[in-house]
Image (cartoon, rainbow, N blue to C red):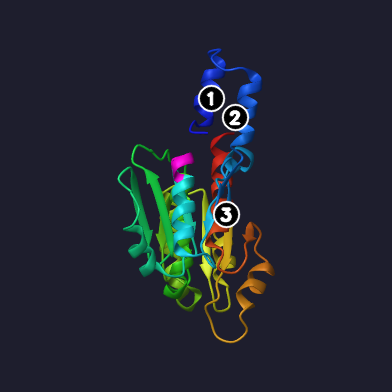
């Protein structure tokens, strides 16, 4: 289509385009076909969250092309769970990126592409806590997702229950910063989200990780069986989903 929704609505308001024409243009821009991929360009209009490219299982050039197309249409785009960051860096050299800003988070396995004239309007603050350093990759995925969605994030890493005294200074700082939601990422026994949610009066989102010994679902089951109210739980290693949930909470709080 080549025009964003704002431009079309302004043309309609000014009488430069008819109701039938604007409806047709919007419908034509629901899906963008890109070889084997079908990109949901207008997802943000329906759900409040733009389409994001899930990188696992995709060829690197499929990821780059899809992310660039979404950035072209929406001004910014994000890809997550990219397995081969080294190959991603190499293949990006084959694309014309003069009009874009590219950010790769190696630890979080994400790619973010912004148009150079795109500005992020931050709407709130979210805290991200990890139990251990092995949980940081999932926390970094959440951090990049929040930034893409326009939410400031503050990270506090390696404060798990094995050294419970580390939690309290972080909670004090979160209260001082007026953070509205906390994402807690934990593997092993997955106890940290329950501890955090028992100390604060804001929503806590637990993210179980695949880090730990023995039975891999223990952190998920622990979080789901928490006795501490105010805790919601996403699936294993789903930093992206936690960030999206946190964003919706912050956004609706701002718009009240």
Say which element carries label 1. Answer: helix
The one nearer the camera, 70 or 182, is 70
**Going 64% across and 19% down the picture, which residue do you hit?**
19
Q: Earlier in the sequence, mark 2 or mark 1?
A: 1
Tell which tag, 1 or 3, sits nearer the viewer.
Answer: 3
Q: Which residue is mark 1?
A: 8
Q: Disc 2, disc 1: CB below 8 Å? A: yes
Q: Percent x, y for residue 73?
A: 48, 40
80 within the magenta span: no
**Going 41% across and 40% down the picture, which residue do you hit?**
120
Q: Which residues are magenta?
A: 71-75
Q: Which residue is mark 2?
A: 25
The part of the image, by quadrant, that contains residue 17 is top right
The one nearer the camera, 135 or 162, is 135
Q: Earlier in the sequence, mark 1 or mark 3?
A: 1
Magenta segment, principal secondary structure?
helix
Residue density around tag 3, few if under 14, some if 14–19, many if 20 or more, within 10 Å: few
């Amino acid at each position: 289509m080549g025009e964003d929704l704002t431009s079309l609505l302004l043309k309609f308001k000014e009488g430069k385009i008819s109701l039938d024409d604007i409806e047709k243009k919007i419908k034509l821009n629901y899906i963008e076909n890109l070889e084997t991929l079908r990109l949901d360009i207008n997802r943000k209009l329906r759900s409040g969250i733009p389409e994001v490219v899930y990188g696992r299982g995709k060829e690197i050039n499929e990821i780059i092309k899809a992310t660039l197309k979404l950035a072209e249409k929406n001004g910014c785009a994000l890809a997550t769970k990219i397995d081969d960051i080294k190959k991603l860096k190499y293949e990006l050299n084959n694309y014309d990126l003069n009009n874009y800003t590219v950010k790769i988070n190696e630890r979080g396995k994400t790619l973010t592409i912004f148009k150079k004239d795109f500005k992020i309007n931050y709407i709130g603050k979210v805290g991200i806590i990890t139990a251990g350093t092995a949980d940081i990759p999932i926390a970094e995925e959440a951090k990049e997702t929040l930034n893409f969605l326009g939410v400031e994030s503050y990270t506090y890493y390696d404060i798990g229950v094995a050294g419970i005294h580390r939690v309290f200074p972080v909670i004090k700082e979160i209260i001082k910063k007026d953070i509205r939601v906390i994402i807690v990422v934990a593997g092993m026994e997955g106890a940290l989200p329950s501890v955090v949610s028992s100390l604060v009066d804001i929503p806590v989102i637990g993210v179980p990780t695949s880090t730990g010994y023995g039975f891999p679902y223990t952190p998920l089951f622990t979080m789901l069986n928490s006795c501490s109210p105010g805790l919601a739980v996403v699936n294993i290693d789903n930093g992206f989903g936690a960030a999206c949930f946190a964003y919706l909470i912050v956004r609706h709080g701002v718009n009240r």
